[in-house]
């Protein structure tokens, strides 16, 4: 069974939600890993949870990128190990340069906490491996700086690996469906290899129908299947 | 070694939308201040630094901007250095 590692920083607050989802609901081995750790040996999938690491001081994710655990995180990311950054975890991945782009304040200037629909745009990542292009997931967002911008001057979206886009009920892209004003309705983006995914909505908060949706579970089930398929194929993960 | 006051300004690049600036602009016009056509909000970081010369301090401050104080993807930064006078 794949070993999950949930990193946590001073001010992370979704670490136990992720742990609950992975350990209790999916029954997978899962470690909670403090940001001062200098090794991620034996981890098959890294989860960077949401929250307000370092109080969002300076810029969300700006200070966490220098935590000791980010060194081994970069190594694993380079080796093709699946990495998912959720909300503040996405912001940390962007600040550390593991994903392109940046975040600014939501266009509404408000903290937005609500359900969104996201459309799957790219299934060639571990976390969308079992999903179909064009299908929709119901996932919640909760952020103040979720307004994603692509690097100015590199706005050719064809070159970017956009994995998730906010959409309406019928899959249409619209301003109403976009909770933060994110460029091109981007809710999630991957690195060029596809193994590092950042997303603003919270899949770990949509694991149980009691809480409104089970759709987020499918992204983690995808990662588990992807890792097992790679193992079977004899590749080291 | 001398002491220097270092003032670093960080602002969003002109091509990046500034939601805070827009809100400030709306608030100003709501208060009746007319004739304001644009508002951009940035931040100022003030440091006291030891160094050999203003040039050397400025070089280090620029490196701080690149590494931490600004996000060069969306922000521009500028550095002003002044030698501190003895109290």
Image (tube, rainbow, N blue to C red):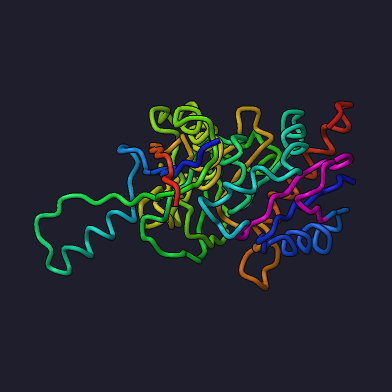
Instruction: Looking at the picture, tell me which residue is in the foreground, A235 or A47.
Output: A47
* Residue drawn at (41%, 44%) of the image: B7
Q: Quadrant of residue A11?
A: bottom right
Instruction: Say if residue B77 shows up in the picture.
Output: no
Instruction: Looking at the picture, tell me which residue is in the foreground, A129 or A6.
Output: A6
Q: Is residue A43 magenta?
A: yes
Determine whether, in the image, residue B75 is placed left or right of residue A83: left
Q: Main secondary structure of the magenta part?
A: loop
Q: Is residue A214 magenta?
A: no
Determine whether, in the image, residue A29 is placed left or right of residue A116: right
Instruction: Say if residue B46 shows up in the picture.
Output: yes
* Residue A130 % position (x, y): 70, 42
* Residue A202 % position (x, y): 61, 57
Q: Quadrant of residue A140?
A: bottom right
Q: Quadrant of residue A55?
A: bottom right
Direction bottom: furthest residue:
A210
Q: Which residues are magenta?
A: A32-53
* Residue drawn at (35%, 38%) of the image: B13
Residue A39 versus residue A212 in the image, above or below: above
* Residue drawn at (89%, 40%) of the image: A42
In the picture, which quadrant includes the C terminus of chain A? Answer: top right
* Residue A58 % position (x, y): 51, 51
* Residue drawn at (50%, 42%) of the image: B3
Direction left: furthest residue:
B35
* Residue B48 % position (x, y): 50, 46
């Amino acid at each position: 069974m794949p070993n999950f590692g949930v990193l946590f920083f001073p001010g992370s607050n979704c670490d136990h939600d992720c742990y609950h989802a992975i350990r209790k609901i999916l029954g997978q081995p899962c470690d909670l890993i403090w940001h001062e750790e200098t090794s991620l040996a034996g981890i098959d999938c890294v989860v960077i949870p949401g929250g307000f690491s370092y109080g969002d001081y300076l810029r969300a994710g700006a200070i966490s990128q220098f935590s000791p655990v980010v060194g081994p995180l970069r190594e694993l990311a380079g080796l093709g190990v699946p990495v998912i950054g959720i909300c503040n975890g996405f912001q940390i991945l962007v600040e550390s340069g593991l994903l392109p782009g940046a975040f600014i304040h939501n266009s509404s200037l408000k903290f937005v906490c609500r359900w969104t629909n996201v459309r799957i745009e790219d299934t060639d990542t571990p976390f969308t491996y079992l999903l179909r292009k064009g299908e929709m997931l119901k996932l919640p967002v909760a952020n103040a700086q979720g307004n994603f911008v692509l690097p100015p001057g590199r706005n050719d979206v064809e070159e970017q690996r956009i994995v998730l886009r906010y959409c309406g009920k019928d899959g249409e892209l619209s301003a109403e469906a976009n909770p933060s004003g994110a460029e091109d309705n981007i809710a999630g983006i991957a690195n060029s290899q596809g193994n590092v995914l950042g997303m603003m909505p919270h899949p770990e908060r949509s694991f149980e129908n009691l809480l409104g949706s089970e759709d987020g579970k499918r992204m983690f089930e995808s990662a588990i299947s992807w890792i097992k398929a790679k193992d079977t194929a004899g590749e080291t993960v | 070694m001398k002491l220097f006051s270092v003032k670093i300004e960080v602002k969003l690049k002109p091509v990046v939308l500034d939601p805070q600036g827009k809100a400030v602009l709306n608030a100003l016009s709501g208060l009746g201040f007319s004739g304001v056509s644009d508002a951009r909000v940035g931040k100022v970081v003030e440091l006291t630094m030891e160094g050999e010369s203003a040039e050397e301090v400025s070089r280090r401050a620029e490196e701080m901007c690149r590494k931490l104080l600004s996000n060069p993807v969306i922000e521009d930064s500028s550095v002003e250095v002044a030698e501190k006078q003895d109290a």
